[in-house]
Amino acid sequence: MAYNGTSGIAMFINFSGDGTPSIRQSRRIASITDHGTGDYALNFSFTVVDSSSNVNDEYAAVGSVGDNGNFTGGYNPERMIKFSNFGNGGLRIRCRNSAGGANDETSICCIITGVFN
């Protein structure tokens, strides 16, 4: 996606969700709220432009989880990440293990793209 002023890959985050969540690196993410095991809210540092009647039309998120506390890589196809509760000020992330249960992850990475202020 080309950047044209207000659209593009404008946010990212790399954080640890194990124990007390902590941000390693981010852009335009103000904070993380811990809602329990494997359940986090990303709080944006700005408000998403809502040019339609549905903020879900304004942006999309992709992400991955790892299982290595040293963050040296490692792809585990049995773990998954789910995005929900898309809003003007943030979104919710839920991490699941291969059995579908909630799971804290040591390495969570997300990219968010869309229409932003």
Image (cartoon, rainbow, N blue to C red):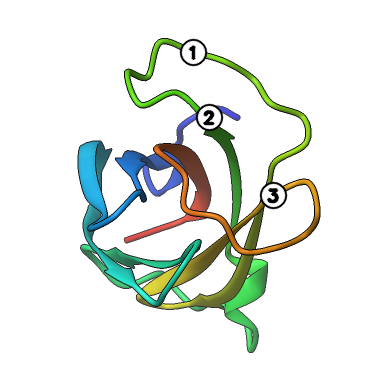
Q: Earlier in the sequence, mark 3 or mark 1?
A: 1
Density class for disc 2 (Cα within 10 Å; few <14, some 14-19, many ≥20) is many
Q: Residue at x 78, y 36 (%)?
A: 78
Is residue 4 left or right of 102 when viewed as pictured?
left
Residues 66 and 12: in front is 66
Kind of residue sitting beneath label 1: Gly
Q: Nearer the viewer, mark 3 or mark 2?
A: 3
Dot 1 or dot 2, earlier in sequence: 2
Q: Position of residue 76 (x, y in %)?
A: 69, 26
Q: CA distance from mark 3 to mark 1?
A: 17 Å
Residue for badge 1: 73
Residue farthest to the bottom, as pictured: 53
Residue type, label 3: Asn
Using the image, determine if residue 58 lies above or below residue 107. Answer: below
> Is residue 84 rendered to the left or right of residue 105?
right
Q: Which residue is mark 3?
A: 97
Question: Which amino acid type is marked by label 2?
Answer: Gly
The percent coordinates of residue 49 (x first, y second) are 42, 71
Asked if the residue under mark 2 is in contact with the one under mark 1, i.e. CB atoms within 8 Å, the reply is: yes
- The residue that label 2 is drawn on is 66
Q: Residues within 10 Å of mark 3 (few under 14, many from 20)?
A: some
Which structural element holds mark 1?
loop
Number of residues whose C-alpha sits closer than 10 Å to that of mark 1, classed few (under 14), some (14–19) or many (20 or more): few
Q: Secondary structure at mark 3?
A: loop
- Residue 110 appears left or right of 54: left
Residue 18 locus on image (x, y percent): 35, 49
Q: Residue at x 47, y 44 (%)?
A: 105
Q: 4 and 12: which one is in front?
A: 12
Q: Nearer the viewer, residue 85 or 8?
A: 85
**CA gap, disc 3 and disc 2:** 11 Å
